[in-house]
Amino acid sequence: MFAAYAAQLSAEDPLSALELGERPDPERREGWVTVRLRAAALNHHDLWSLRGVGLREEQLPMVLGCDGAGVDEDGNEVIVHAVIGSDDFRGDETMDPKRSLLSERHDGTLADLVSVPRRNLVAKPAELSWAEAACLPTAWLTAYRMLYTRGDLKAGESVLIQGAGGGVATAAITLARAGGLKVVVTSRDEAKRQKALELGAHEAYESGERLPARVDAVIETVGKATWSHSIRSLKPGGRIITSGTTSGPDLDDAELTRIFFTQLSVIGSTMGTSRELAQLVALLDASGARPLIDRAIAFEDARDGFAAMLEGDVFGKIVFTR
Ligand SMILES: NC(=O)c1ccc[n+]([C@@H]2O[C@H](COP(=O)([O-])OP(=O)(O)OC[C@H]3O[C@@H](n4cnc5c(N)ncnc54)[C@H](OP(=O)(O)O)[C@@H]3O)[C@@H](O)[C@H]2O)c1
């Protein structure tokens, strides 16, 4: 099968570690199903993998990709849930200490075929295009869990979404509007702020700019560059939900004094369950909200998509189609 895979690891030059070419088809495994992919989407995670974060030399070559949608062995149109739990774990699979994400221990979705446990398949409604469906399992599911499970946000509450151009951030804007929230965003880039407003944000500010009114919750995936601003933007009793550190995890100031004095909650969140993926699909189906696709690229040209993400020249999801 044709695949995009990590052939080596390079912290400084991740694109040099990317290879596009033939890999063996997945082997048959009890309880697992092979899906022929129709579309796959790119995540920052794929760049982290090429840099050697979460992937070791001895695991190479590893097919990249967490997001995908396609047709299973019985002809069903399915979305692939990327969290691979251990066989004997029951309950919320994101809490399974032995879980992995597709492309961390098992070959991922940037390929003609992917093999996953049968329980990782979620039905794709006909109303969602292949490209739209392929956007959901990582960035969109992460945004959904941050907002509505871990953040427990309710209609009428206000939320600040940092780094408006990102995959998780654009998903959060659309999902927050679909759930009746007041949406405030920041971005370093004026064009991205404008696009965020067009996407549904009520207000958009430059990164680090003081907000006119404090918010109930912050969706934080940027880390070091925005953490302090996130904490300072919360109302007393507010919550910050964090799932990523694109600009780095080491904080200049964790704002601990403000956290205890204004009684803030710091909430970690990671991916989501297959049940939440099904709920997310139902929310899109019912609300008409759809993933924003920055660009759809032929799978053979996947390197261009990786390069665009590395440049930060992205608003929404990069999708590879067939
Ligand atoms: N825990 C999980 O389950 C999970 C799941 C998905 C993603 N993540 C993590 O979440 C993060 C975002 O993922 P993604 O796929 O959405 O990535 P992405 O599409 O590359 O978005 C990153 C965004 O961060 C902002 N940013 C980057 N550097 C910045 C800086 N120095 N100052 C201010 N803003 C900066 C940018 O926003 P502007 O250009 O608009 O300023 C950019 O659009 C990644 O670190 C990823 O690993 C975690």
Image (cartoon, grey):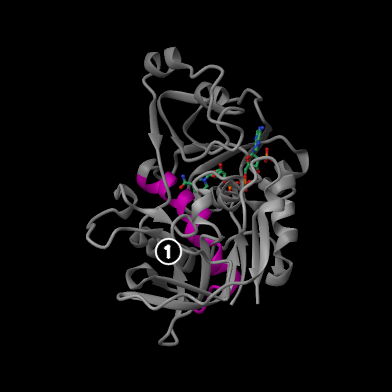
Segment colored magenta: 126-149
Q: Which residue is at a point 52% across and 72% down the rendered structure image? A: 69
Give the image quadrant in which the ligand numbered 1 is located.
top right
Seen in the image, is 151 located left or right of residue 126? Answer: left
Residue furthest bottom as drawn:
74
View extreme (front): residue: 58
Residue 242 within the magenta-colored segment of the rendering = no
Q: Is residue 146 magenta?
A: yes
Give the answer, above or below, for where 138 lies relative to 30: above
Q: Is residue 100 left or right of residue 14?
A: left
**Left or right of residue 229: residue 236:** left
34 or 161, which lies in front? 34
Residue at 46% across / 50% down in the picture?
142
Q: Secondary structure at mark 1?
A: loop
Residue topped by disc 1 = 81
Q: Residue 100 in the image: x percent, y percent?
A: 40, 54
x and y percent of residue 170 in the render? 60, 50
The picture quadrant where one finds residue 73 is: bottom left
Residue located at (65% from left, 72% from top): 321
Of helix, strand and loop, which mostly describes the magenta segment? helix
Position of residue 12 measured from the top left corner of the image (x, y, whole percent):
69, 40
Residue 320 in view in this figure: yes
User: Residue at left 52%, top 62%?
Assistant: 67
Which image quarter is the N terminus in? bottom right
Q: Residue 39 at what x, y percent from top left? A: 59, 72
Quadrant in which the C terminus is drawn: bottom right
Name the residue type under label 1.
His
